[in-house]
Image (cartoon, rainbow, N blue to C red):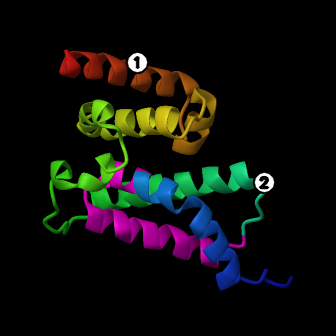
Amino acid sequence: MDAKPLRTGGQVEDILVRYQNTVYGLALARTGSRADAEDVFQEVFLRLFKSSTDFNDNEHLKAWLLRVTIQRCNDFHRAVNRRQTENIDDCRELSQNIPQDYSELWSAVNSLPDNQRTAVHLFYAEGYSTEEIAEIMDCQPSTVRTWLHRGRKELKTMLE
């Protein structure tokens, strides 16, 4: 059985251009550190380069990228020898293109626990349904709905 050839640099570059903001934004939201987000970003696209996965369409590819991003972020959180990182409040990139009216909201979102923050990000920023988020995060749709409910409740408390 012949092994499938790896993706070409050009193929990965096209995908990178299309999904770089999505992958980096999720990595930054999950890690709270530009340096860690950049590491995750690089590892996600390196993994794509080495992967022989056939994608049915762009949504399948995007879901794969988001799933790998979440997995790599979880790996960073589990790492024993984590280095000192910047506080997410110091990262202006998250609110750079957000109208002033929303910067307080996204600041509050960034203070949510990982699962709630990821669910809120994927639901509101990326437009995924709870069923799609459940597939990406490898959990039940009811769990995603619970994270969204708790996240909204926490955000309401923080913003009042």
Q: Position of residue 138 (x, y in %)?
A: 55, 41
Q: Position of residue 127 (x, y in %)?
A: 57, 35
Relative to 57, is 146 on the left or the right? left
Is residue 60 toward the left or the right of residue 106 in the image? Answer: right
Residue at label 1?
A: 149
Residue drawn at 58 percent across, 67 percent down: 17
Mark 2 surroundings within 10 Å by alpha-carbon count, few (fewer than 14), some (14 through 19), many (20 or more): few
Image quarter for residue 79?
bottom left
List x then y, in percent, for residue 133. Answer: 56, 36
Task: Check disc 1: other Cα within 10 Å, few if <14, some if 14-19, many if 20+.
Answer: some
Examine the rendered structure and indicate whether residue 42 appears above or below residue 21: below
Task: Name which residue lies at 53% across and 76% down.
Answer: 46
Q: 149 above or below 3?
A: above
Name the residue: 57% across, 59% down.
19
What range is drawn magenta here? 26-52
Q: Amino acid under label 1?
A: His
Element on which disc 1 rests: helix
- Specify whether residue 114 is in view: yes
Between disc 1 and disc 2, whose residue precedes? 2
User: Residue at horizontal 49%, vertical 22%?
Assistant: 145
Q: Amino acid at mark 2?
A: Asp
Between the C-alphas of marks 1 and 2, the distance is 31 Å
**Vertical relation: 6 (above or below) 144:** below
